[in-house]
Image (spheres, coloured by chain):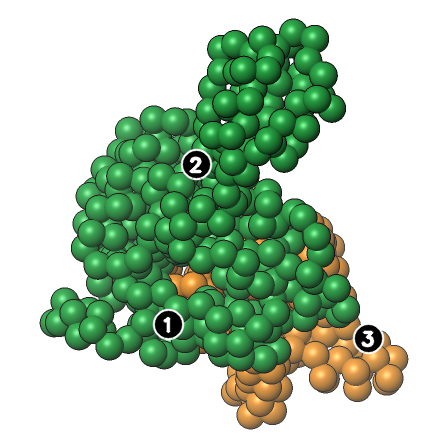
Chain colours: A green, B orange
Amino acid sequence: MTQNVLARDEVTVAAVDLRGLTKRYGQVTAVDGLDLTIRPGEVVALLGPNGAGKSTTIDMMLGLTTPDRGRAELFGASPAQAVRDGRVGVMLQSGGMLPDLTGAEMVTLQAALYRRSRPVSEALARAGATGFADRLIGGLSGGQQQRIRFATALVTTPDLMVLDEPTTGLDVEARRAFWAAVHEEAGRGRTVVFATHYLDEADAYANRIVLMRAGRIVADGTAAQVKSIVSGRTIKATLPGADPVALAALPGVDEVDVRGDIVLLRCPDSDAALRALLTTTDARDVEVTSRGLEDAFVALTMDGDTSS
Amino acid sequence: MNATYLRMEIRRLIRNRRLLLLSMLLPALVLLIFGSSAKHDTLDGVTGAEYIMASMAVYAAMVAATGSGGTIAVERGLGWNRQLRLTPLTPGRYVLSKVILSLLMAIPPTLVTFLVGALVLGVRLPAGQWLGIGVGAWLSTLPFAALGVALGYLARPDSAQQIGGLVITVLAAIGGLWIPITQMPATMRSIAKFTPTYWAGEIARGPLFHHAVAGRAVGVLVAWAVGLALVAAVRFRADTARA
């Protein structure tokens, strides 16, 4: 029966619908007229520097904070209603667990609060937490606690999973396993929204990136689309005794960074720059790389000031 | 109420023996000291030991019931309430679970005061009176269970335990659990009649004097319980602090 409800919703109703969402704290506008629609099945990364309004947006999305203006809807209902209906599973960055329960007890308790859930042992296994599920949470390492948190989010089989900095404290192996499990959930039609500081994770695992700055969305699209906003490439070469002024004068070069024998050239037109560099200087070991998500992130969230 | 939630809470309680032991030790100790010295006094045919034991049964139950407040404050500090707000558990069912837990917690300390009374102070009563005192003391702790929950939301995690201890000690003193209000000045006597402690004491000591439970006693206790439960439910809704 539940499956039918999910299937019907997928056609008509957005998983997350934020319209003109605004929240002020005194003089500070934390979120400023934000519009965002997320379709069921999307895996969305919410990125932005500290203070960009990610946490406030998530709080309003979950009904923990009331917006000053605008509205937030989950599956066509109020956030509070969606939470009451057990359609939302949340994995907090820290806390949210009772240290004097075992991991298995914590997951059992979480499952009992929801109308539908999957077996506790299955959730623990998928989160890679079976090995230490019988120990008290207070005695677990940060990474182990994070796996228990993930198991509590998985056990409730929510339609929308909201993950706040989910892989903090996990090692590389665990992070990979974590995202594999998240993608399996998304494959079943669940919607995933996560906030992260690891840009490589957003790049690799989200099929949509929403970049926030000063309470607004400054970029929204696939990782490739967001990266393409920042055009150009970086040329890296070995060039002892380089003259920064001469290098900056080369065609196609925007910015020069000399670090010992290494020079870094930021180029809007790397082809022209490369031609000139190899013919007019002794540069060797030349590498050309396109800008990553990090460059886009820095360019879109740091320069200028549109918030005033 | 949620049965699994309550079961997990009871497990936590058993794991954290400190709170349970403390709630049993303190009233037993007070009963030993006051009860021994007043053992042979009588009032309307009731011995001092019997009178103080009934008062201490109330005190024991209320200390235990209010003690849950400290745990709620700590849970708030852990971000557990924020997590709970994101589950289908409603504020009403949450507060009800906590109140039931507080009532359960109040049983062992009440029984310990009875044991001290019977074994050390030589209190001998008909079964009906034991039952009347026990059930009276126990059910009269309902407002204190609600007080504990409300305090758990109003106080900070690091001070909830101390504030709770202070509040119930003051309430116990004003309400005549330490010294009967008949030995207090008139002003204090009128103030006492607004406290839940006074009426809880009256209900628990009633069987000794063959008094029926007064309607006013029930009224005052229910008013306190409902008022404090409302405060708790409102605070639960408002409390979304991040860990």
Residue name at image x 72 percent, y 84 percent? B193
| Disc 1 to disc 2, C-alpha distance | 28 Å
Residue B88, quarter of picture = bottom left
Residue name at image x 32 percent, y 38 percent? A178
Q: Local crowd at mark 1 within 10 Å, few (<14), some, or many (≥20)?
A: many
Q: What residue type is labelled 1?
A: Leu
Tally the numbered discs.
3
Residue B188 image position (x, y, % from top left): 83, 80
Tell me, for residue A200, which label it has, or none: 2
User: Viewer-proximal residue, B33 or B86?
Assistant: B86
Whether residue A120 is situated above or below residue A23 in the rendered picture: above
Q: CB atoms at circles 3 and 2 under 8 Å apart? A: no
Q: Can you identify the residue that label 1 sits on? A: A74
Q: Can residue A61 be seen in this view?
A: yes
User: Viewer-proximal residue, B152 or B141?
Assistant: B152
| Disc 3 to disc 2, C-alpha distance | 75 Å
User: Viewer-proximal residue, A138 or B44?
Assistant: A138
Q: Can you identify the residue that label 3 sits on? A: B183
Q: Local crowd at mark 3 within 10 Å, few (<14), some, or many (≥20)?
A: few
Q: Which amino acid does label 2 sit on?
A: Asp
| Disc 1 to disc 3, C-alpha distance | 63 Å
